[in-house]
Amino acid sequence: MSYWRQPLDRKRIQVAHGIVHIIDDRCKGCGFCIEFCPQNYLIISERSNSKGYHPPEIIDDQQCVNCGLCALLCPDFAIYIEDGGTRSPDKVSPIQKGDANQ
């Protein structure tokens, strides 16, 4: 569903932005960061690191909301997040809910 109009105070809304850094050689490819990212910001890459594992890859630099969950869950400390400040969203969209039976 998309809205045909946007809130009047959209420019006053500020969304946190994070810059994700991945240390490829520390990663063992467990996939915790990919599985639990609330923005679906990370995917498994095709390339492999020096240990033979496939580290995560960033899809879009603008999607990270600086929650820090990936860095918190990483057992190898292969991910860290730099604060990218705040910005106004380009478009406000509704939250997509899953199945109503959950």
Image (cartoon, grey):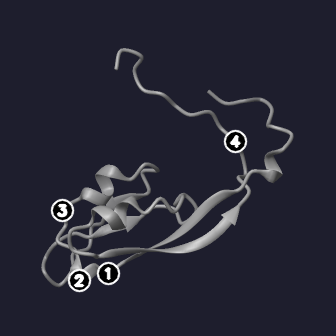
- Residue contact at pointers 4 and 1, CB within 8 angstroms: no
Residue drawn at x 31%, y 59% as measured from the top left: 33
Q: Which residue is mark 3?
A: 30
Q: Quadrant of residue 54?
A: bottom left
- Residue contact at pointers 2 and 3, CB within 8 angstroms: no
Residue drawn at x 35%, y 67% as measured from the top left: 71
- Mark number for residue 25? 2
Front residue of this view, candidates 82 and 94: 82
- Mark 4 → mark 2, Cα distance in angstroms: 37 Å
Q: Is residue 32 above or below residue 79?
A: above
For marks 4 and 1 on the same chain, the one whose residue lies earlier in the sequence: 1
**Rendering coords of residue 23 (x, y %):** 32, 81
- Mark number for residue 58? none
Q: Is residue 98 above or below residue 48?
A: above
- Mark number for residue 23? 1
**Rendering coords of residue 70 (x, y %):** 35, 62
Q: Which residue is mark 4?
A: 92
Residue drawn at x 28%, y 61% as measured from the top left: 73
